[in-house]
Amino acid sequence: MTTEIDVGVAEDAFEKNNLIKLECSTYETTIALSVVDWIAKRFPRDAALLDVLHFVYRSIFERMDGYHVWLLLGDTRWQDDTRIIRFRKMFSSLKAQGLEFKAFQDRREFMIEQFGRLKFFGAVRLDEDELALVPKVMQPGSCTYLLALPGILPDLPEFSGWSGRLNEDSELIQLNVKNDGIIFQRVGYFDDPEVGLVALGKPNVLARLVAQR
């Protein structure tokens, strides 16, 4: 069965549109952002999201020379500062949940502390055959993004991490967009009839990604 994927484009992400709602006050006044989404009927469940992921991944590598795709992960809740939590960090904790990232050679991980509690954040570079992991971590309320970026991954905002909410993560988004990066978030959860990805990036960068051929 072939999944039909609808592509939507809004050239100005800050103008009223049907794809996303950004608060201008949380972003720099000089930054220009466009938004694109790729949407499929949610059947059968995560299989539709995986089809969207493969479609977008292939579009990146066909049209965006030199780009790599990264999965950004983060804790949604503060954890107690214990020796075992510090030892496990993020990727060992995910392994205990059946999500194996330790074999990924190109990965990063860091910790932030606040009021005696801890959060962990990380990034792994994905090949296409590893995309099946993505729906397992892009769950409701997750602190997870995909990032397409040319060249190497820059230093992430290690002093603050990210929340998984676009209007709170303007620092992360602007940091990568200024480097011609594209940041992706999952859309469609629970009983939503559709599922897919929404992306933010410079207008000219996203135009290359969705250009008709």
Image (cartoon, rainbow, N blue to C red):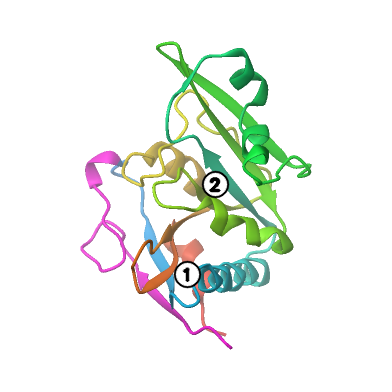
In the image: residue 201, left or right of residue 152? left
In the image: residue 15, left or right of residue 119? left
Circle 2 — which element? loop
Picture layout, residue 80 above or below residue 170:
above
Residue 67 versus residue 184: which sits nearer the camera?
184
Task: Work out how far the residue at label 2 is from the one at label 1, CA to CA, in angstroms.
Answer: 16 Å
Residue 18 versus residue 49: which sits nearer the camera?
49
Picture layout, residue 48 above or below residue 176:
below
Magenta segment includes 130: no
Task: Tell me which amino acid carries mark 1.
Answer: Ala
Picture layout, residue 35 above or below residue 113:
below
Q: Residue 72: x percent and y percent?
A: 56, 44
Quadrant assignment for the N terminus: bottom right
Q: Residue 123: x percent and y percent?
A: 62, 41
Q: Which residue is mark 2?
A: 179
Please report the residue visible at 63 percent of the width from the left and 18 percent of the height from the top: 84
Q: Residue 209: x percent and y percent?
A: 54, 69
Is the C-beta separation of discs 2 and 1 under 8 Å? no
Magenta segment includes 13: yes
Q: Residues within 10 Å of mark 1 (few under 14, many from 20)?
A: some
Please report the residue visible at 51 percent of the width from the left and 68 percent of the height from the top: 49
Residue 179 versus residue 22: which sits nearer the camera?
22
Q: Residue 130: x percent and y percent?
A: 70, 58
Q: What secondary structure predominates along the stretch shown in magenta?
A: loop
Residue range in magenta is 1-26
Q: Which residue is mark 1?
A: 207
Residue 181 visible here = no
Quadrant assignment for the C terminus: bottom right
Please report the residue visible at 79 percent of the width from the left and 43 percent of the height from the top: 103
Mark 1 or mark 2, which is nearer the start of the sequence? Answer: 2
Picture layout, residue 106 above or below residue 211:
above
Please report the residue visible at 60 percent of the width from the left and 27 percent of the height from the top: 110
